[in-house]
Image (tube, coloured by chain):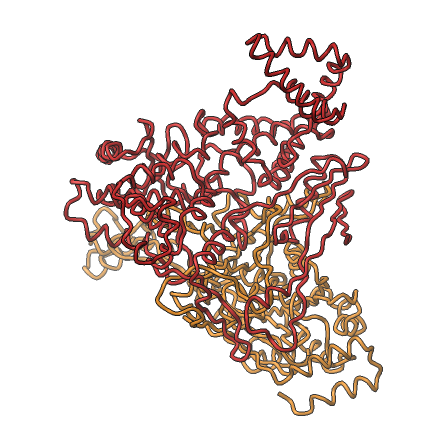
Chain colours: A red, B orange
Amino acid sequence: MELINQHTKRIMEGCKERARAAGLSFTDESLEYIVTNRDLLELSPKVMIPTLYDYWVHDVEVLRERGKYELYPNNPYETVINTRPPISFYNDNNPDWLNVMIFYHVLAHIDFFQNNLYFRHTWDYDFTGQALSDKRVIARLRAEKGRWVDYVIEFARGIDNLVDFHGELADLFTPPEADCSSRLNYYFDLFLQSEKKIPVSEYIKEVNRYNECLKTYGELGEKTFFAEAERRYPELEAHFARAMDTRPAKKRDLLRYLLDKSEFLARDENIWMRSILEIVRKTSIFFQPQIRTKILNEGWASYWHETLFLQDDRIKGHEVDFARVHAGVTSMPRVGMNPYALGMRLFTHIEEQADKGRISFDYQRLANADSRKQFNTGVSTGKDFIFKVRENLSDYLFLKNYLDQDFIDRHKLFVAGKRLDQQRMVWQYYVKSRKAKDYLQMMQDSLYHPPVISVDQTKGIEGSLYLIHKFEGKQLVQEYIANTMVGIEYLWGGPVHLETSEAQILPAPAAPAKTDEALEGEIAWQRVLYSMNGKVLSKKKF
Amino acid sequence: MRNDLPTYPEELRASGLDPEREARLRAELATATDSHAVPARDVPMDPDLAGFSRGLYESGDLLVLRQAVTPYLSAAGLAKSLDELLERDRQREQDGFPRKIQVGKLVKPGRGRKGKVVVVPTTVEEKFFHDPTVRPPGEGGTSGGTGDEQEGEVIGEQPVRDDGDQDGSGPGEGGGSNHEMESSAYDLGKTLSEKFQLPNLKDKGKKRSFTRYTYDLTDKNRGFGQVLDKKATLRKIVETNIALGNLPDVSDIDPTQFLIAPRDKVYRILSREKDYEPQAMLFFLRDYSGSMVGKVTDLIVSQHVLIYSWLLYQYGGQAESRFILHDTEAKEVPDFYTYYNSRVAGGTQVSSAYQLVNEIVARENLAKDYNIYVFQGTDGDDWDEAGSKAIPELEKMLTYASRVGVTIAEHGQMGTTTVARYLNSSELLSKKPDLLRLDVIQKDADESRLIEGIKRLIS
């Protein structure tokens, strides 16, 4: 890996000026490296982070068949990584005009990383620096503990998709004034309601009294309030202290839960494993927003590389070259999904709609097709609006909010289905639906969505860990359950149970049903409990 | 196909046949007329439809923006050798964790029809995640599309077999392209090369020229060269001087008076020498009868892939391979691709394959010039219950073969398969341990077990 030459860097700086002028915002510094295919082989298993820790699986071809992207919250071949400064990777023989296009694409990504709120937790530090120190920690541990380090990495990575990314974000976005002291929370949320079970009227009286105290005594309000409360309930302080000790851990974040609650990991001889779990968890959390904003991010970058390239005065004469490459990236495939194409079109669509004031209740309540077509308030706020979209949304909301029938019709989109023609033994591809609702559903089904698996503390008897997989109409990949649970059992240090659902496909009825709706009814769901005890997996039905 | 097929089971039942085997025989009979078709090579997927199973996340910037091509990780380029990886895997087992490395697994990454056979050590990182493939039978999922067609209109068709998602991992099933098979096999062989050597290799038939050479100073050249050949030079000089009459008295020679022509200097010159090494002929025999369906074929073919890959690398042009498939009749197929991919169907006569090998060896007089090795893979089933036809053919084979390695991938009978039984009772195994080896593997064997098996067969 070497840096790009000064000539190319100058082009990049020119791109930055123009991108800033167009409204994008990003940090001043950036690093651009030339990578060879050999570099790529090393970088791609490390998700393009050059300083990521070493792990033997990175040296082996990893089978990434179905569900490939369900396994990893990142893409193997990114051009730019979200670090401080951002680092991007290039081919060494790109012509200048192509570099200009790619630079704009990269700058839009950087703008996205640094402004989209789903990336909020990555803004305050440099991940490559962090990763380098983590890498050293792991290397040192490996020198001491040998292969057991790799087992712990493996087991931790086995559950690194079960991290509570949204919970992590929620903590960041809680406004300071909305935050109450933990004592206050405990007093009103638990103590009065669960412990004392006081009637509602008295509860309200207490709330009023608290508000009075605040009003009267200002900053000393809370203290005054509790002085009175403790006189009434002398045991409050002791209860509160106990509750703090046994505070319910984050139940949707299995890695966090193991870190906090596993007695096995708390033993002196195993305490080193915690740092590995922390590293794996941190890495996973870092990448979580990336996969949740694929369409948005690529759409945003494609939108801007098109807009800015066409305005750039330096590349006159390469419009046709550009058009060819650009079309290759952003044309809608006949069948299949292209996040670049869809995202870019959706941004353009939103901008136009907002320019005409159509993203409003007035427009939505119109039923008359003709007046819908004519609707134009001329507010021209499209640019501002797409910047807001870029700042606040993820793929899910982006599609849910703006993928409407107008958009579907305009770009002639449809849901393509595939069915088996048994007589002729061919798969038929057909137009399944042209409704926006169905298209949205199809898109949402293909978005990254790790299973929601939470810990049920009430059911884990005698030191076992009880996990509940929330049923969302899909089953877990069965062949991976056993080995994943071996890992959890190891990290927990005791038996592990997993409650989940399994599909049973009923035999096809005698007369094959014509419609798909009838076919979908053929799956029967069965709730099952997997138990892993002493590396032996057992399964029972409920 | 023989016309008297159905009489075999009748004869067998007369001599006592357990019901489970009979069921398998019946099943084989049912497929007796099926063809062993090798799937057509590379039926191109309609490019429009290829994107159907392509997910939303499969495009990354580097590839899409034409910045790079997907790097191909070759087995030879691995940072760790296969040995190290397998050692790690053994260690895992000792530590009480399930093994993780799969070697020589033939995988077709599901990228429409462009998938290729990859023969490298692979692994998976197991996690909990939703299985997108659970859906009602006959439904192939959904994707996005663009176009003018009406709802319900069919936009394209694709034969079922050629669907990227649907076909499994190759052997006996089809798929893959010939060239890639060879090149990746070579890669795999490279990683295995340290492990094995052909046993009982004798010097035979030095009549073939190989592309292998050594360089030696054996050729002479007049006028220039690497090293002066003093004796030959002096002789030339003497000859020249006699011819010139410059040497009147042979009893009194004065070398200082010699006239020396440039052409008289004789040099040794570096030259390419053909290197003759013993040559080997390998016969791969595979049972492709109906009972070989599924995992057993997978195992046999995987093992033969490993042997074949290693040969290709280690012995290059020096070892030749012949491929023979048999059900009740044997036939020779031209290349490994066909050998690898032919579908299973029909009944089983192991002797037919032995017979064909014997015929080929006799007809082409191979025994004189070649070290002959035979590797046979079967599930151990044979309609020839007592081996009354197979054993004599095998004995004949052992008179010229340097090693016969039989691999039996069992359906789970624990050493009681027909072939194992008649091989044992013939006592050939104990009488000629140097020539005949038997390796019995279970249906659930993994790749490292296969490699151990190869060691057993050719050690």
Horizontal relation, residue B267 to residue A192: left or right: left
Q: Nearer the viewer, residue A3 or B396?
A: A3
Q: Residue at x 68, y 20 (%)?
A: A187
- Point out the image quarter for the N terminus of chain B: bottom right
Q: Return the x and y of residue B409 as percentages of the image width and height.
A: 70, 66
Q: Nearer the viewer, residue B315 or B21?
A: B21
Instruction: Decide if residue A344 is in sight here.
Output: yes
Q: Residue at x 62, y 79 (%)?
A: B358
Instruction: Decide if residue B227 is in sight here.
Output: no
| Image quadrant assignment for residue A19 | top left
Q: Is residue B143 above or below residue A275?
A: below
Q: Is residue A252 above or below residue A242?
A: below
- Point out the image quarter for the C terminus of chain B: bottom right
Q: Return the x and y of residue B121 as percentages of the image width and height.
A: 56, 51
Q: Nearer the viewer, residue B28 or A176?
A: A176
Q: Return the x and y of residue A57 as percentages of the image width and height.
A: 56, 43
